[in-house]
Amino acid sequence: MSFRDYIKQVKPRSEYKIKPEEKIQDYLFLDEGILDSLRNAGRFLTQKIKSAARFIGTKIKRAMSTLSFGSQVKISLNYATQGKSLNEAVDKLDLKSRMGYYSEFCTAYELAKIISDAGGNMRGLTKQQLLKHRNDYKANKLLCNDCEFGAPKPKVVQEAKRMEDSGIGLAKSIWSDIKQNATDLQVTEFEVKLTGESGKGITKADIELIAYKKSTNKVIDHIEASLKAYKDWNINVSNSTFTSWVINLLAPDIGGFQTKSTVNAKVTEFVKRYGYEKQMKEIAKYQKFGPSIKRDADRATAKKAVDDEQVYIKVRNLMIEVFEKNYKKRKKEINENFMKLLGFDGADDLYLAVQKKKGGEVAVLSSRTSKGFNQILDSMKEDFDIVFEKSNDKVNTSITFKSGNNILFKSNFGFRDLDKVSQFVSFKDWQ
């Protein structure tokens, strides 16, 4: 059934009574503490446009009032868009990603504070500048009057505090790691770089801490840190759309981080190389199914349609079918791609902060120092097998990574948000 056919069967939107969302499995709430909430994007966009127009109008009026005959005046309007290009001025009210960026700013500031307190020397952004970044972001992106995330303000404040607490723990761990090589503060300079937003599509690292030999560009140590702040050790390590999950594992150069091709273009290129046209077109069709209904109706209608059509189970079976048929032929290559998808390839230093109780202790796992995690990474350098364990009754699927009869670890393969798949891994035993 197409989404248009489904829409014809449901009541008009004016008559549809939205039911509360079904409670999602607990582990799905761990992805940054708060899942994205429903927002009225049109109203938000209108508010932003009106606000920017008022700002620009005021600036022009003030500038014109100062002009004399034959004189000129320059007007800086980028404050109306918070320094962004005009076509980038309006972003989505995405609390999850904003908390992620706030965690970076908190960790960066705490690092600078530790360095300053230890009597270390800094280059680049100063402690005061990093503090301003953190405070401005909190005021303008989390607690602003227009920041309506669908979550009560006290909850947003609570989550922000969790990011601040986690930032302290993460900074201490990163500092401890770099001090293993940068032992003499008198001959060392440190630089903290924020890369989570500027490096999007290029690196997974959220911040970088670089130790230089003083007054030179000789690097003593360089930590490219991927930061995660959670409430539990069962952690969402990867999110993909249906098609990108397949393509990133089997043909990452088509669907990698830096490619901006359309879904159809990527699928066409994949089919041209490997075949499986029927399966890939079905996966792409189901990827559009739920979001298309949501655009024409609402999220509740889309969710019901996805459930009625058993979209997640159908897509899962198609994805696994394409994966397994390719896996037999290109096992070593696909193993490497899967490790990269999970962030287990060692390209960045992984730092996980977990605070189970509000205001409680923050535990941090560093991929540099965790013996358990590094044993897993070492094992993954050898030959291993990827095995899917699924049932026709449940959508969520277990993926076992094993070497012979020895199980290395398991990942849970879950679906969400109508067109996405997430990979969950428990780090509990790797602290």
Image: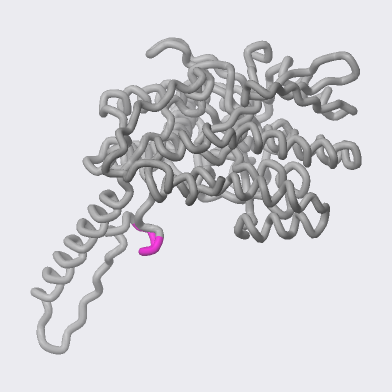
- Residue 246 x/y as whole percent: 71, 43
Q: Which residue is drawn at 21% across and 77% down?
A: 73
Q: Can residue 112 be seen by looking at this rendering?
A: no
Q: Residue at x 60, y 43 (%)?
A: 241
Residue 103 falls in image quadrant = top left
**Residue closer to the observer: 365 or 272:** 272
Q: How is the image coloured?
A: one colour
Is residue 16 rendered magenta in the image? no
Q: Quadrant for the C terminus, please.
A: top right
Which segment is the magenta one? 83-87
- Residue 60 x/y as whole percent: 17, 71
* Residue 303 located left or right of residue 419: left
**Residue closer to the observer: 157 or 307:** 307
Per the picture, the main secondary structure of the magenta-coloured stretch is loop
Q: Report the residue that reaches farthest toward the bottom.
A: 70
Q: Quadrant for the N terminus, please.
A: top right
**Residue closer to the observer: 274 or 83:** 274
* Residue 315 located left or right of residue 195: right
* Residue 250 located left or right of residue 228: right
How many numbered circles does the render carry? 0
Q: Is residue 231 above or below residue 304?
A: above
- Residue 251 x/y as whole percent: 76, 49
Q: Can residue 84 be seen by looking at this rendering?
A: yes
* Residue 173 located left or right of residue 243: left
Residue 326 falls in image quadrant = top right
Q: Is residue 191 above or below residue 185?
A: below
- Residue 387 x/y as whole percent: 80, 25
Residue 203 falls in image quadrant = top right
Q: Which residue is drawn at 46% across and 35% down?
A: 303
Q: Report the residue that reaches farthest toward the front.
A: 9
**Residue closer to the observer: 322 or 217:** 322
